Amino acid sequence: MLEFRSVQASDRRLVQSYISSMPYRNCDLSFANIFVWSFLYDTRIAEYGGSLFVKYSFHSKPFYMMPFGRCDLKTAIEKAIEDSIGDDLRFCMQGLSPKMKADIEEAMPETFSFTSNRDYSDYLYLRDDLVGLSGKKYQPKRNHINQFKRNYPQYKFVPITPDIIPQCMELESYWKSVNEDEKDKTYIALDSERQAIRRAFDHYEELDLLGGALLVDGRVVAFTYGSPINGNTFDVAVEKADANYIGAYTMINNEFAKTIDPKYVFVNREEDLGMEGLRKAKLSYHPAEILDKYTAKLIDK
């Protein structure tokens, strides 16, 4: 059996040593995401035979991520299946990108059935598109930015530092209060999201997060942060703004994209969770790819 243990912020380098060299770009692989949500999903990790295993609970059911590492993929998955024998439900892997799905099918043909849910597909953008906002399709975004600059000419965009984190949490509380009606529309309640953000800020340096805040008259009116997934993809985990400041969302998005190292060709802005307004907003930035993610279940033999 695999010896699983709870995931800690100090595990970042360990987990990234397995994942960051992989070609997969889904947001589930961001170590910061794995850690900050571990309180909700009871996320645990194990090492065996040169591979990393991640196990968690979703809707009170046990799931595994695809194993990562030097071990043969078929051998690693069989080890995870062996570990799952003690679970009441059958072995399942979740959060599988099309590339991961293809790798699993090649390693273990006719072993799994795959299903996907559009609500959990990731939105991938080209960093250069988010920075330049060039062309007719981005004209509305440029209009929002110009309006913000006209209304708030003394605005500042600054890195997130410990001294402004309390203001960021105040903004998060305000944002939560005006979006309370959304909390029952997804599995993730806003109280849980607040706890995840608090955990991210509590371990900000340890998680090696990159973030920025938009200030108007010294007040934080928007903030965002994220971290790399692999060598060419950066994950934007959180973006919050006071919508009373017209254009604040567009402004924080654009300013933050400029701070992301150009080596990260892709920016993953995560799922829309089936929320109509969020889906519309994410589509309005014209994603380069909508990355479907699959759940794999063993086929009855």
Image (tube, grey):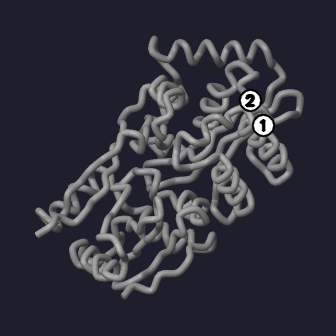
Q: Nearer the viewer, residue 60 or 192?
A: 60
Is the residue under label 2 in contact with that under label 1 (CB below 8 Å)? Answer: yes
Where residue 90 sits, quadrant-wise, is: bottom left
Comes first in the chain, label 1 or label 2 = 1
Where residue 265 sits, quadrant-wise, is: top left
Q: Position of residue 254 (x, y in %)?
A: 60, 30
Q: Residues within 10 Å of mark 1 (few under 14, many from 20)?
A: some
Q: In the image, what residue occupies the spot 76% across and 12% down?
A: 150
Judged from the image, the secondary structure of the residue bearing numbered disc 2 is loop
Where residue 19 sits, quadrant-wise, is: bottom left
Compared across the picture, whether 34 is left or right of 3 comes to right
Q: In the image, what residue occupies the spot 20% across and 57% down?
A: 113
Amino acid of disc 2: Asp
Rendered-image quadrant of the C terminus: bottom left
- State whether residue 280 is above or below residue 98: above
Compared across the picture, whether 36 is left or right of 164 comes to left
Amino acid of disc 1: Tyr
Residue 8 seen in the current view:
yes
Q: Nearer the viewer, residue 113 or 246?
A: 113
User: Which residue is label 1 attached to?
Assistant: 174
User: Which residue is label 2 attached to?
Assistant: 242
Q: Position of residue 38 (x, y in %)?
A: 57, 65
Q: Position of residue 191 (x, y in %)?
A: 68, 50
Q: Position of residue 190 (x, y in %)?
A: 65, 46
Q: In the image, what residue occupies the spot 24% across and 78% down?
A: 78
Mark nearest the camera among 1 and 2 is: 1
Q: In the image, what residue occupies the spot 34% across and 85% down?
A: 49
Compared across the picture, whether 165 is left or right of 208 comes to right
Rendered-image quadrant of the N terminus: bottom left
